[in-house]
Image: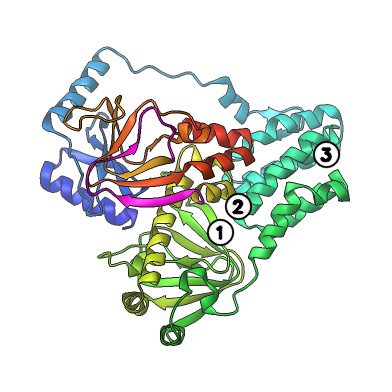
């Protein structure tokens, strides 16, 4: 459901259960391996000041999974009263860094930055410094430009400006590293125009021979190859293996739609009624964020199948992301009922569509994860490529054994893993600890092929994602240190 629907439903639940005592300060979407949920910040509305009760998980009906107890509400009010009585709320001094952002930088004569127009402000910082040409102005731009890297929409362009500054300062190695980082950002977004400009700058900086061997050249070639349009609907991997009759029926019920750059195919939270297959062009996937505009987490090239939730028997299925054309694009639109009928005749198709749904959910979780979300899309795809299986646990079973190097790393989608010290634990004893939903276990041990200190037992009713240890080690050997460090921190 959309944020507005959840907010309205939650307010209705609060009025029914708590009257006018509680109110909603904010609702934000929470990405999970098993799907999605919502987190609401609940307050006691007071004429003096709002009193925060806490944050609570909300289901798709707008009801809190575990509503606040009367004791918790009373405790929040008591703590606020004690805090006010003690005069705990003091004025917070403005940090020097905050002053710096509001001051005029005398080295290049420009106020920094304008948060409403980061792209143009970064460009002007670069332009002023280059126009002056002296070392002090260039170093001033070097200090200022990194402040714009937090803006996801202009990160690639900012890195290119930073590369040019380093080139002018006589630091070709640093300039090349910034260009490679920019190229990765553009490749994640399938921004071919900017990637080509980045490649041109890299060729000028490195020379033709070194450029041809560079990561930037590889990224450009890979992206251009992926843009090759499909000839027919059944070139899409997810729709292969159909009988002639099934192909005939599907082809005659698929509608080819043309999209202009910026056209929105579906919005997150809308009813999911259609499956789309990208024929040509690019479709971006955008996810709602806690604050600010939606975040683009990947682009889908020809052959991608989207909207699979609409055909998997989920009552009231909703779109889990917004889809937008990034260039002139064509997609085949297939009514969910038509594809569901063919899935009923073809188990292989049903399995592929179901697998696509699970992978898209895990991908969304990775994209918005605090650590994994910072990795390149290509790296996240490689991690997904290490996926071995997704299992619903019917009986308590050992997933990882203490004293042995694990063959798999685990990600809990639903339920939990119970951890024991013994290799063969007594299931009736209490575990030392548990690993809950959206958490990894055994990843560090799998990466380095070392014995696990704990036995992990997947509890009945849990859903666990297993990643192949050998593929993970191969990925680690091919990846930069920051990728390995990110994976190690996950557990």
Q: Which residue is pictured at 45% across the width and 60% down the height?
A: 322
Query: Is residue 405 inside the magenta stretch?
Result: yes
In the rendering, which numbered label is found on residue 188? 2
Q: Could you say which is closer to the camera, residue 239 or residue 324? A: 239
Q: CA distance from mark 1 to mark 3?
A: 34 Å
Q: Could you say which is closer to the camera, residue 465 or residue 106? A: 465
Is disc 1 in contact with disc 3, using a CB cutoff of under 8 Å? no
Q: Is residue 455 left or right of residue 114?
A: left
Q: CA distance from mark 2 to mark 3?
A: 29 Å
Q: Position of residue 314 (x, y in %)?
A: 27, 64
Query: Which mark is first along the chain, 3 or 2?
Result: 3
Residue picked out by circle 3: 130
Is disc 1 in contact with disc 2, using a CB cutoff of under 8 Å? yes
Instruction: Tell me which segment is drawn in magenta.
Output: 385-407
Q: Residues within 10 Å of mark 1 (few under 14, many from 20)?
A: many
Tell which tag, 2 or 3, sits nearer the viewer.
2
Image quadrant in which you'd find residue 112: top right
Q: Is residue 14 left or right of residue 458?
A: left
Tell which tag, 1 or 3, sits nearer the viewer.
1
Q: Quadrant of the C terminus?
A: top left
Q: Could you say which is closer to the camera, residue 390 or residue 217? A: 390
Secondary structure beneath disc 2?
A: helix
Q: Could you say which is closer to the camera, residue 367 or residue 447? A: 447
Residue picked out by circle 1: 299
Q: Position of residue 340 (x, y in %)?
A: 33, 75
């Amino acid at each position: 459901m959309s944020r507005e629907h959840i907010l309205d439903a939650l307010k209705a639940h609060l009025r029914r259960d708590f009257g006018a005592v509680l109110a909603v300060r904010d609702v934000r979407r929470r990405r999970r391996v098993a799907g999605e949920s919502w987190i609401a910040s609940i307050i006691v509305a007071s004429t003096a000041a709002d009193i925060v009760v806490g944050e609570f998980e909300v289901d798709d009906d707008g009801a809190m999974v575990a509503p606040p107890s009367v004791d918790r509400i009373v405790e929040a009010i008591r703590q606020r009263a004690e805090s006010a009585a003690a005069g705990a709320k003091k004025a917070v001094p403005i940090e020097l860094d905050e002053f710096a952002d509001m001051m005029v930088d005398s080295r290049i004569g420009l106020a920094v930055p304008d948060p409403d127009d980061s792209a143009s402000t970064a460009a002007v910082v670069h332009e002023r410094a280059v126009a002056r040409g002296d070392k002090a102005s260039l170093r001033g731009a070097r200090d200022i430009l990194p402040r714009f890297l937090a803006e996801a929409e202009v990160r690639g362009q900012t890195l290119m400006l930073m590369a040019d500054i380093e080139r002018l300062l006589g630091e070709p190695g640093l300039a090349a590293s910034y260009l490679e980082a920019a190229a990765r950002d553009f490749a994640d977004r399938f921004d071919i125009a900017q990637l080509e400009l980045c490649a041109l700058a890299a060729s000028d900086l490195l020379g033709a021979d070194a450029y041809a061997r560079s990561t930037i050249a590889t990224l450009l070639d890979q992206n251009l190859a992926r843009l090759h349009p499909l000839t027919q609907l059944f070139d899409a991997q997810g729709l292969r293996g159909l009988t002639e009759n099934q192909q005939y029926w599907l082809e005659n019920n698929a509608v080819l739609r043309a999209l202009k750059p910026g056209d929105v195919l579906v919005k997150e939270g809308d009813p999911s009624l259609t499956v789309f297959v990208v024929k040509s062009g690019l479709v971006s996937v955008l996810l709602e964020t806690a604050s600010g505009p939606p975040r683009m987490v990947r682009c889908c090239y020809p052959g991608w199948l989207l909207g699979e939730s609409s055909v998997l028997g989920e009552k009231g299925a909703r779109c889990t992301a917004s889809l937008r054309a990034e260039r002139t694009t064509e997609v085949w639109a297939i009514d969910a009922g038509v594809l569901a009928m063919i899935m009923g005749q073809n188990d292989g198709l049903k399995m592929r569509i179901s697998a696509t749904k699970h992978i898209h959910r895990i991908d969304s979780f990775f994209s918005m994860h605090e650590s994994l979300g910072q990795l390149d899309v290509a790296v996240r795809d490689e991690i997904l490529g290490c996926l071995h299986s997704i299992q619903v646990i019917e009986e308590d079973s050992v997933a990882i054994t203490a004293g042995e190097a694990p063959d798999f790393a685990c990600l809990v989608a639903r339920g939990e893993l119970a951890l024991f010290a013994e290799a063969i634990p007594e299931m009736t004893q209490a575990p030392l600890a548990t690993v809950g939903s959206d958490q990894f276990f055994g990843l560090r041990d799998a990466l380095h092929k070392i014995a696990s200190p704990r036995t992990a037992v997947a509890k009945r009713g849990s859903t666990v994602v297993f990643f192949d240890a050998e593929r993970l080690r191969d990925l680690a050997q091919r990846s930069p240190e920051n990728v390995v460090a990110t994976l190690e921190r996950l557990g």
